[in-house]
Amino acid sequence: MTVPRRAHTATTLPDGRILVVGGLDGDSYLATAEVYDPVAAQFVTVGTLSEARAHHIAIRLADGRVLVAGGEGAPGAPLDSAEVFDPASNAWKRVGSMRAPRIDHAAALLSDGRVLVAGGYDGARMLALVDVFDPKDGVFHPAAPMSAPRSEFTATALPDGNILVAAGVGGSVRLATAEIYEARLDRWRQTGPLQARRGGHVAALLADGGVLVAGGIVGIHAVATAERWSPATNAWTSAAPMRETRFGNVALGLPDGRVLVAGGENDNGSTLASVEIYDPSANTWLLAPALGSPRAVMAAALLDDGSVLFTGGWAPPEAWASCEVHLPKPAE
């Protein structure tokens, strides 16, 4: 990349390029963005955001544009602003603001093309507040709040058009609760509780419509444990644990239905280069070839050939501008 980045985002565009946005270069918050062209195998700078931001969310809209919202523009200064990138013109446009500044929030695309943005931390308290961004008017509209404030949680779009949010931090405690947003009715309903109170974990949609969550912090420790939510039972059950404890890592659903996790930090505070792949049919984790550099707080995105582009991150005190492409071995 043109600069080192961590706490940034990476989003696959409709033409197969990868949009990389914002983040931190050392202690400097970035307003720059760049696009990776897999054909030329190079990065090109694309415009400048209206505000520098890190720890934000990025969601590709149904029309191929990318919504970027919230995050932090300076230490302890969450943002309520949002902007949209148009890959046709490689330009940014400011859109309406959220009702509150947010960091450690989560977002997911609804089946009607709107974007649910939920929870997070506004600089003073955790939020149950939910906004829905409508790309037709560029405005965030109020939606029903979650039943509990939460940050450092996950939001996963389900095949039926609903959104599952899971665990996270609520005030001074980690949560084992999960709830589903029913977009058609603008309401939330509870699932069964998770097996563990966790925050800072990762989640991925499974081929059967269920959701896998893995890792994160339970109590004061990073964990290797994982669990699965089933839409048939609305309950969580334990899944096979990862081979390493990790948080601050990435997770991606692969085209063949498996789930890849990579990097992060373990419970001893060491930055990881290891990569693991979960096979939901066998309920097993297999080690994959490791990253060339240990990376935490990186970003990853799928390329059209099924490989994964890993960008930036850091192994304190070193931050990376480097990137690497990983081609997961197909399931046998």
Image (cartoon, helix red, strand yellow):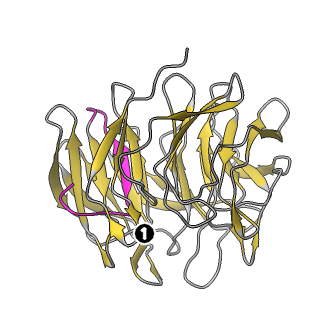
Q: Which residues are magenta?
A: 1-16
At label 1, counting other C-alpha atoms closer than 10 Å, the crowd grade (few under 14, some 14-19, many 20 or more) is many
- Of 94 and 7, the residue lying toward us: 7
Q: Position of residue 10 (x, y in %)?
A: 36, 49
Residue at 35% across / 46% down in the picture?
292
| Residue 178 drawn at (x, y percent) | 76, 53
Whether residue 135 is visible to the viewer of this picture, yes or no, is no
Indicate left or right for 321 with 307 as reference: left
Instruction: Give the percent coordinates (x, y) of residue 300.
Output: 40, 46
- Looking at the image, how many numbered discs can be counted on the residues? 1
Q: Is residue 3 in the magenta section?
A: yes
Left or right, 23 with reference to 296: left
Q: Is residue 98 above or below residue 296?
A: below
Is residue 285 toward the left or the right of residue 294 in the image? right
Q: Quadrant of the N terminus?
A: bottom left
Asked if 140 appears above or below 78 in the picture, the reply is above
Magenta span: predominant SS is: loop
Q: Residue at x 44, y 41 (%)?
A: 290
Image quadrant where residue 167 sits: bottom right
Q: Amino acid at mark 1?
A: Ser
Residue bearing the label numbered 1: 97
Q: Residue at x 33, y 56 (%)?
A: 312
Seen in the picture, residue 308 relative to 268 is either above or below; the reply is: above
In the rendered image, the quadrant that contains the C terminus is top right
